[in-house]
Image (tube, rainbow, N blue to C red):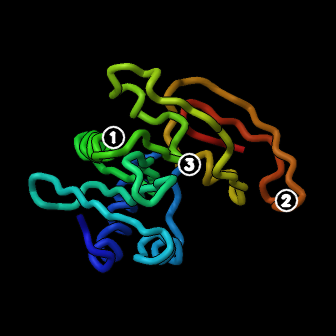
Amino acid sequence: MAEPSAARELFPAIHEDARRGQIGDVRTYPGKWDELIQAGPLGGRYMLLCREDLRPSGYAVYRLEREERYSSHASVVVEHLISCTDASYRRLWAHLANLDLTDCVLARGRPEHEALQWMLSDRRQMIVTDVHDHLWLRLVDVADALSLRRYGTAGTLRLRVRDSFCPWNSGCWLLAAGWWTR
């Protein structure tokens, strides 16, 4: 378990390290850390895992929700879970799923391709209740967008772009096996 001050110091670097391996993940704005790592309204609990070399490799921010104050039944609500390694990912979820006196784990805003389903002995234990877009992007430089990414297959694709907001993007683009030309 990590104190809020340690979490505030370490979690941003773990997130930055993990997001680089996650397609479509973006930097977290600084104010988000203040919201996420606070001892107040969330009633959060913070867990920090370390690699064998003692470098931080993942964290979970979660809270327990009970219908009644002294009920023996609670739900684990995962506010944020990030991992840099498969091992820490498995350990975080195992910890959350095995907390005493809890019935279920609720996690909102998780990636659509969540690996958790493949870790369960019965995949039917995981129920996806909602899928929605979380990240909307607007390309402001088509040339950089096409040239700075990797492509998994060879081939060509011709794109016609009409962009009145960023007119420099307008035109016909040829993407060929990972390189672009106009």
Residue 57 position in % (x across, y down):
25, 55
Which one is nearer the viewer's eye here, 4 or 74? 74
- Upstream in the sequence, badge 1 or badge 3? 1
Q: Label 1 amino acid?
A: Ala
Name the residue rendered at 41%, 45% in the picture: 73
Is 97 above or below relative to 137?
A: above
SS state under label 1:
helix
Residue 9, given in percent of the width and then of the height, sits at: 31, 76
Q: Nearer the viewer, mark 1 or mark 3?
A: 1
Of pointers 2 and 3, the one earlier in the residue sequence = 3
x and y, in percent, of residue 87 in the image:
23, 41
Q: CA distance from mark 2 to mark 3?
A: 34 Å
Q: Residue at position x 56%, y 48% from top?
A: 109
Mark 3 surroundings within 10 Å by alpha-carbon count, few (fewer than 14), some (14 through 19), many (20 or more): few
**Helix, strand or loop status at disc 3:** loop
Lateral position of residue 177 relative to residue 181, left or right:
left
* Residue of label 3: 109
Q: CA distance from mark 1 to mark 2?
A: 51 Å
Left/right of residue 128 with respect to residue 157 in the rendered view: left
Q: Which residue corresponds to mark 1?
A: 97
Mark nearest the camera among 1 and 2 is: 1
Judge from the rendering whether residue 107 lies leftward or rightward of residue 71; answer left or right.
Answer: right
Q: Specify the quadrant of the image occupied by residue 13.
A: bottom left
Q: CA distance from mark 1 to mark 3?
A: 18 Å
Dot 1, crowdedness within 10 Å: few (<14), some or many (≥20)? some
Callout 2 secondary element: helix
Residue 167's disc is 2
Image quarter (top left, top right, bottom left or bottom right) of the N terminus: bottom left
